[in-house]
Amino acid sequence: MKVVLIKDLEGYGSFGDVISVKDGFARNYLIPRGIALPATEGNLNHVNSILSQRARKLQKEKEKAQTLAKKMEGLTLEIVRQVGEKGKLFGSVTSQDIAQALQEKGFDVDRKKVMLKNPIKDIGMYTITLRLHPEVSVNIKVDVKPVE
C-alpha cells in the first residue's frame, strides 16, 4: 500500500514522502496514529500545498535575515564593564549582554543567535558571529571597555 507521510518517521522518511508499506502496517499503525494518509490524489495535493507554504515561509525568513545582515555589516558594539587588575572583568560579557546591546541599537536579535563559544572575560575588541538564519550569518565587532 502506498501512503504519504504527514509526520517524520525514522527509518521510513520525512513529511511529504510517499512510501510503500504493507497493508496491515498502514491500516493498523500509520493511519490511526496520524503518521500517514493513503496516497490518494487529494491527499498528495494537500501535502504538496503544505510543503509549498513551508517553502515560501522559509524563503521570507531568509530574505528578512539577509536584509538585517546587510544593515548590521560593520556594526561595532561598545560594552562597558567594571575591570579589576590586569584588565580582567568583574563577571563576563555573555550572549545575553550582546543581544541586549543590539536591542539598544534597534536590532531585535535573540540571544540564541549569538554564536559565542565562551563568555568574554577580558577587555578588548572581539569579532562575534550572529547566525540570523541557517544560511545567513553576519560578523559584528564587540568592543569591551573599562568603566572610566
Image (tube, helix red, strand yellow):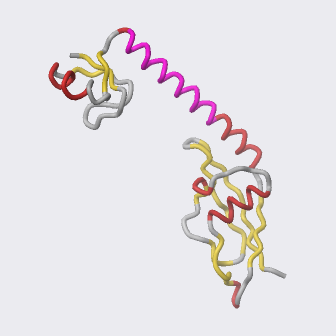
On the image, the x and y values in percent for residue 87 come to 70, 84
- Indicate yes or no whether the magenta region holds residue 31: no
For residue 35, side relative to residue 145 (left or right)? left
Looking at this rendering, what residue extends furthest in the top direction? 41
Q: Quadrant of residue 33?
A: top left
Give the magenta-colored segment's residue range: 42-62
The kind of secondary structure the magenta stretch mainly shows is helix
Residue at 32 percent across and 28 percent down: it is 34
> Is residue 92 placed above or below 104 in the rendered structure?
below
> Is residue 118 placed above or below 102 in the rendered structure?
below
Q: How many marks?
A: 0
> Is residue 70 placed above or below 4 in the rendered structure?
below
On the image, the x and y values in percent for residue 142 come to 72, 64
Residue at 30 percent across and 34 percent down: it is 9
Residue at 74 percent across and 55 percent down: it is 103
Q: Quadrant of residue 7?
A: top left
Quadrant of the image for the N terminus? top left
> Is residue 97 placed above or below 148 in the rendered structure?
above
For residue 12, side relative to residue 110 (left or right)? left
